[in-house]
C-alpha cells in the first residue's frame, strides 16, 4: 500500500511538473505583453466620437492601437475590430485569464437616433425574434467554420435612461462546445451625430461583478458640448434610419456596418496559437465563444 501510494504521488508530481512550466510561460508572456500597454487615467478625450471619458479609479483606458493589440495579439482574435479604445478594470490584470474583462469602445456615425420608440418596445417579443434570428443564422455560421450559438435570454432586460440618453442591456449566450455560458453586456450612448458603443464580454458567472463596473463606465462618458443629444438640429443634422429597437436587436448591423467588425471578434475563438503572445489563449475562450478547429479566422 505504501509503495502504491508513493507511486501515485510520483505520478501526480510528474503530471504537475509537466504542466506547470507551460502555464507559467503563458502567464509570464501575458504579463510581459500587458507591461507594454500604455494605460491612461483621469480624463481622456475620444475625438472620433467627440466625447470625453472621466475615469473613476476603477478603470484605465487603452487607445485604439493598444485596444486592437489586446483583441488580436493577446486574445488571438482577427484584426480589424475598429475599436476606438478600451476600458480596463483595475481590479484584475489583463494577464489574469480567469478574472480579466474589458469594455471595447466603438463609434457609429449614422446620425441622430430617435428615441421616440422607447416606450413602445416589447422586450419579450423582441427577445423571441432575436432568438429565432440567432437560430436561423447558425447554418451560415457553421459553413464559415464557427460553432452554433444560442441566445439563452436577457441577463439584464434592456433599460433606457431618457434623461441621459443611455441604453443598456445584457444577453446570455451559449456557444456550441462550451459548458459555461457567455455574458454579452451592451451600452449605447446617444449623441447628436451618432452612437457610442460600449460592449463587455465575459463569462455569465461574472455578471455580479461586471454589472456595477458597467454602471461606473456608463457614468464616465459624456459627449462634448455641441455633440450632445440635446444639441441636435433637425434642420441641418442627419437622422439615422433606425431607432432604439434596432440598436438592441442588432438588425441594423448588416445595413449600416454597426458592430460588424466587433461581432466578428465576439464570435471568433480565443484560440491557442503556437508561438508569440497568442499562446496565452488557454482558458479564456469563455469570453468570446469557441471556433471549431480548422474554421475561418
Image (tube, helix red, strand yellow):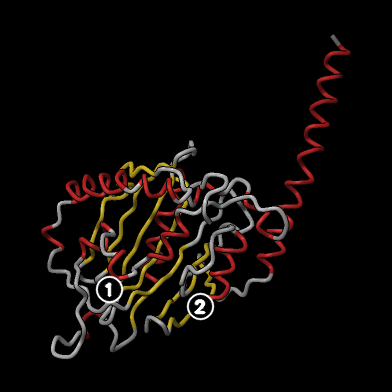
Check disc 1 and report the residue beneath it. Answer: 190
Q: Is residue 157 left or right of residue 19?
A: left
- Between disc 2 and disc 1, the foreground one is 1
| Count of number-bearing discs | 2
Q: Is residue 237 left or right of residue 144?
A: left
Q: Is residue 169 above or below residue 12?
A: below
Residue at the image point whose x is 54% and y is 72% from the top: 62
Mark 2 nearby-residue class (10 Å; few <14, some 14–19, many ≥20): few
Check disc 2 and report the residue beneath it. Answer: 42
Residue at the image point whose x is 25% and y is 79% from the top: 111
Secondary structure beneath dot 2 equals loop
- Residue 295 position within the rendered picture, expressed as x and y whole percent measured from the top left: 53, 49
- Residue 219 position within the rendered picture, expressed as x and y whole percent measured from the top left: 36, 69
Q: Is residue 270 above or below residue 241?
A: above
Q: Quadrant of residue 37?
A: bottom right
Mark 1 nearby-residue class (10 Å; few <14, some 14–19, many ≥20): many
Q: Is residue 215 left or right of residue 239?
A: right
- Residue 297 position within the rendered picture, expressed as x and y whole percent measured from the top left: 53, 56
Amino acid at each position: 500500500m505504501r509503495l502504491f501510494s508513493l507511486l501515485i504521488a510520483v505520478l501526480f508530481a510528474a503530471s504537475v511538473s509537466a504542466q506547470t512550466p507551460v502555464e507559467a510561460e503563458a502567464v509570464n508572456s501575458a504579463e510581459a505583453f500587458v507591461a507594454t500597454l500604455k494605460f491612461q487615467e483621469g480624463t481622456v478625450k475620444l475625438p472620433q466620437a467627440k466625447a470625453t471619458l472621466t475615469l473613476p479609479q476603477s478603470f484605465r483606458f487603452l487607445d485604439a492601437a493598444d485596444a486592437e493589440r489586446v483583441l488580436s495579439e493577446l486574445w488571438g482574435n482577427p484584426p480589424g475590430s475598429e475599436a476606438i479604445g478600451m476600458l480596463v478594470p483595475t481590479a484584475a490584470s489583463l494577464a489574469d485569464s480567469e478574472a480579466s474583462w474589458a469594455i471595447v469602445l466603438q463609434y457609429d456615425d449614422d446620425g441622430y437616433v430617435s428615441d421616440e420608440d422607447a416606450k413602445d418596445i416589447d422586450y419579450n417579443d423582441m427577445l423571441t425574434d432575436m432568438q429565432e434570428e440567432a437560430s436561423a443564422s447558425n447554418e451560415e455560421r457553421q459553413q464559415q467554420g464557427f460553432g452554433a450559438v444560442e441566445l439563452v435570454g436577457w441577463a439584464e432586460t434592456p433599460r433606457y435612461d431618457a434623461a441621459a440618453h443611455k441604453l443598456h442591456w445584457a444577453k446570455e449566450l451559449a456557444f456550441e462546445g462550451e459548458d459555461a455560458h457567455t455574458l454579452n453586456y451592451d451600452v449605447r450612448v446617444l449623441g447628436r451625430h451618432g452612437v457610442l458603443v460600449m460592449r463587455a464580454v465575459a463569462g455569465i458567472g461574472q455578471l455580479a461583478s461586471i454589472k456595477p463596473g458597467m454602471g461606473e463606465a456608463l457614468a464616465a462618458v459624456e459627449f462634448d458640448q455641441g455633440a450632445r443629444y440635446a444639441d441636435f438640429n433637425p434642420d441641418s443634422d442627419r437622422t439615422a434610419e433606425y431607432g432604439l429597437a434596432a440598436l438592441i436587436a442588432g438588425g441594423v448591423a448588416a445595413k449600416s456596418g454597426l458592430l460588424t467588425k466587433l461581432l466578428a471578434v465576439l464570435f471568433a475563438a480565443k484560440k491557442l496559437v503556437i508561438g508569440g503572445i497568442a499562446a496565452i489563449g488557454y482558458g479564456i475562450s469563455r469570453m468570446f465563444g469557441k471556433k471549431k478547429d480548422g474554421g475561418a479566422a
